[in-house]
Amino acid sequence: MIFTTSSFYTEPGYNFDISHKVFALIKEKITKRLCDTGLKGMKDDETLSLMVNTSSSQQTIELKGPDIDRKNKFLVYCLWLPYDRIAKSDNLLKVFLTDYFDGLMELFEKYNIPENTIRAIQTEVENEILFNDEYVFDEEPTPEIDLSDLDL
């Protein structure tokens, strides 16, 4: 099984400033702990994807899905996280990780993964990420795109 995780925000102005490096580390830790041994009901060539989202009205942690793409062997879940609780917290990254892993618990419960396994991964991730400047969100400027050559 292949595991991916990322974010996709659909409401303008409502997103979490979380570095892609955070998602990469979570993917690495889950792959190492869970994917190499397999998940009940998942084949080696199937992909389990978790997309993080939020909105101005989202007040609770909510796991939706899966959306299934049988042709490409993808199962996609969407994890909706509460915007205000995370964005207005004193430590956005800490609260984000807490809520993210609470949602991850709900996801992996479907595959009979014990809570202590997920919490151990959470502890590893938090120990590496929190107070480590390498994982601080650093927004890259959007490059200017010259469309003058296009015949529109």
Image: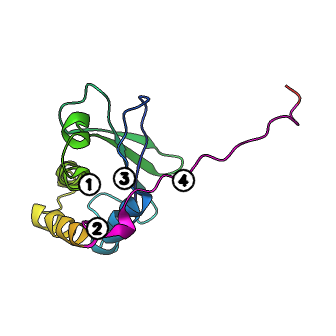
User: Is 129 one of the magenta-colored residues?
Assistant: yes
**If you read the primary sequence from the N terminus, does the residue marked by circle 4 or circle 1 appear first?**
1
Give the crowd class for mark 3: few <14, some 14-19, many >=20 residues within 10 Å: some
For the question of whether residue 78 can be seen, the reply is yes
For disc 4, the marked residue is 140
For the question of whether residue 2 can be seen, the reply is no
Cβ–Cβ under 8 Å for marks 1 and 2? yes
For disc 3, the marked residue is 18
Cβ–Cβ under 8 Å for marks 3 and 1? yes
Q: Which residues are magenta?
A: 128-150
**If you read the primary sequence from the N terminus, does the residue marked by circle 3 or circle 1 appear first?**
3
Quadrant where the image shows the C terminus: top right
Which marked residue is nearer to the observer: mark 4 or mark 2?
4
Residue at x-position 20% and y-position 64%: 122
Residue at x-position 30% and y-position 67%: 30
Classify mark 1: helix, strand or loop: helix
The picture places residue 10, in percent across and down from the top left corner, at: 43, 31
User: Is 8 one of the magenta-colored residues?
Assistant: no
Which of the 4 image quadrants contains residue 86?
A: top left
Q: CA distance from mark 1 to mark 2?
A: 9 Å
Q: CA distance from mark 4 to mark 1?
A: 19 Å
Residue at x-position 79% and y-position 40%: 146
Left-right relation of 108 to 21: left
| Amino acid carrying mark 4 in the image | Glu
Disc sitting over residue 93 in the figure: 1
Q: CA distance from mark 3 to mark 4?
A: 13 Å
